[in-house]
Image (cartoon, coloured by chain):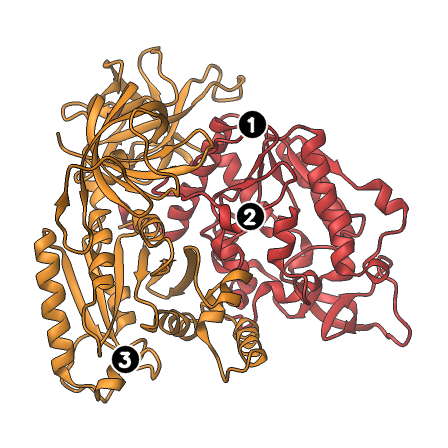
Amino acid sequence: MSGNVLRFTTAGNVDDGKSTLIGRLLVETQGAFEDQIEGAKRENERRGGKGIDFSLLTDGLRAEREQGITIDVAYRYFATPKRKFIIADAPGHEQYTRNLVTSASTSDVALILIDARHGMLTQSRRHAFIAHLLGIRHFIVAINKMDLVDYRREHYEEIRKDFTTFIDRLGGAAIYCVPISALKGDLVTESSTRMPWYTGPTLLELLESIEVDDQQHKLHFRFPVQLVSRPPASPGFPDFRGYMGRVVSGSIRVGDHVVVLPSRARTTVTGIVTHDGLLQEAFARQSVTLTLADDLDVGRGDMISCEPNPPQVRTEFKATLCWISEQKLHLNQRYTLRHTTKTVRAIIGEINHRLNVNTLECESPISELQTNDIGQVRIKTLQPVVCDPYSVNRQTGGFVLIDENNDTVAAGMIEEK
Amino acid sequence: MTHNWTHLRELESESIHILRETVAQFRNPVLLYSVGKDSSVLVHVARKAFHPGPLPFPLLHVDTGYKFKEMLEFRERFTTEIGARLIVHRNDDAIAAGAHPLKLGVARCCGQLKTAALLHALDKNQFDAAIGGARREEERSRAKERVFSLRDTFGQWDPRRQRAELWSLYSGAIHEGETMRVFPLSNWTERDIWQYIVQEKIPVVPLYYAQERLVVRRNGTLIAADDSIHLKDGEVPERMWVRYRTLGCAPCTGAIESRATTLEEIAAETGAAKISERSTRIIDHGTNTMEDKKREGYF
């Protein structure tokens, strides 16, 4: 468990009621305050609306409120006695790949909204596909606007079947479906008498109880070094040398044998240092400082890992890229590749194919990738990258490409071979 | 493990990671220390991040001259105690010219004493990254903020030109003259902040605790009636049990009625609050919004 924090991304089509749903979740769990709700009401009335338009609560930028569209991912917070929730709320239209990929990259669960009247549209499929591509394996499908289909079960069942079939095609994931009316409040945080045929949990109960079973704990130990700690002598630390970082996967105990990559130097962990005292063991997600038995040349960008089962050391690999820049991908141009704590120069040698997100077909030959395109490429790096396939480890398999303007132009996921 | 891995540990660990990335990627970072509760948490987490070493950056306080005297006393005591390097920067020209919110209006006063002073201090000391305690939950334009947030050569924020930020990869690449604002507490809420202060026993300015104080009611806000504000005609100070939910300049920060005199009571009161914390800040009222101020270079 990631410390009883559930990070989820939300996606939906325009007009499917996502703002209404998030607004209701925030208001009913006290994640939004009365003055903010009042502000949203006043703003709506100023432009001739009535009551509360929840999107005015969630759309943070003036340009968004003026144009009535959501431009950028917004982060929202609420908590119940059971859990803290972080919502990465992605708009469904403009720059949709960029926003969905960004919000999915930090999430364990995707909440997909589907309008009960329309069923699964292309856009719903696209959202589910991107979330799945980014490694999300828990989907909550909120089938919304049940009030507009007289709360009839057939609509729910049909969408559930379609969604399950689609996810199975992608390789499968856990799916939880709940019929709701975000507008009327049925089955969002409170139960409903209007759908006696549904006996499952409300949406909030689902969010509170879903077991994401944090994958990172079960994987092999990976510790990208952020900084070397070499402080002036202090009481208890006369001649300290340690390696600061966050355990991104697995766990480590004092006395464990480790290998430092890419140098392949072998040594033993002698201490796990934190401000709260020395630890015997550290786990995925913990930020600690490690001390090692030998004086080795270890610095930022190196990876301390368990042995056996170390990560791969590669200068050439296949990767799936989500191209988010408005500038096209240029073959044989140099990019900066940022991966774990390492930054290397990289060149994209070839584009193998582009994925048609609507048909899920691979298109080739392809000579360029443009905004919102997803494609498989071959990348060469000038220095080695210490990595795992993204399908195995999201933290050591994901990278970004940065161009000479310092813009982040692509999100990448390293493939098996 | 992970039976004791609470949401506060998760937030703390993420913040430590961000602080270390900042030190690794920038030549000359600084921590913007506003003396408030979020700054107290930020400094506490920073000390944890670099243990057993000292803080690898100085603290910068932009002093408008209108800060509560309890804040200044606390600042001196706290920074001395932890052995931090403190830089205090004031826009002395504007202060000498008598800048005051009642005279200039709140927006212009803030612009001179806070935004201009901050940008000048960053420039004068050649800081390339400024670490702040702002949280996404505080205000709706902050909900769209990156953890590493780029500022152009004028210190300005362009919400339409933000970089994508994926996984836990933070890109600190900047061109000459640009700077970065870094927000390690992005994912914390006000409730998390108080729960953490209780858990870690972090010292905070006494103004956060309720006591009887002399205040005046001005446009529905309770303003401290001490020597730092000019009373308007007809305003009569009264004694009330109040405390502060956020701390800024004395003339522009409202108190709330409260009897919470312990950290636990404050945390409980925060958990039950119906009104957002920024509602007590006059700078957030009116037409000059947080988004405008952020665009100009405000935190």
Query: Please, what secondary structure does the residue beneath circle 2 have?
Result: loop
Dot in front, 2 or 3: 2
Q: Chain of mark 3?
A: A
Please tell me which residue is depicted at 39% across the width and 39% down the height of the picture: A327
Q: Is residue A348 visible?
A: yes
Query: Please, what secondary structure does the residue beneath circle 3 have?
Result: loop
Q: Chain of mark 1?
A: B
**Label 1 with label 3: CB-CB less than 8 Å:** no
Residue A87 vertical placement versus B31 (above, below): below
Query: Please, what secondary structure does the residue beneath circle 1 have?
Result: loop
Residue B52 placement, left or right of A411? right
The front one of A268 and B101 is B101
Residue A46 place in picture, x, y as percent: 59, 79
Q: Give the residue pinned by disc 3.
A: A145
Residue B39 vertical placement versus A204 (above, below): above
**In which quarter of the view is residue B180 placed?**
top right
Q: Amino acid at mark 2?
A: Asp
Please tell me which residue is depicted at 71% across the width and 34% down the height of the picture: B87
Dot in front, 2 or 1: 2
Q: Which chain is red?
A: B
- Mark 1 crowd level (few <14, some 14–19, many ≥20, 10 Å Cα): some
Please tell me which residue is depicted at 24% across the width and 68% down the height of the picture: A206
Q: Which mark is residue B56?
A: 1
Q: Chain of mark 2?
A: B
Q: Give the residue pinned by disc 2.
A: B158
Which color is chain A depicted in? orange
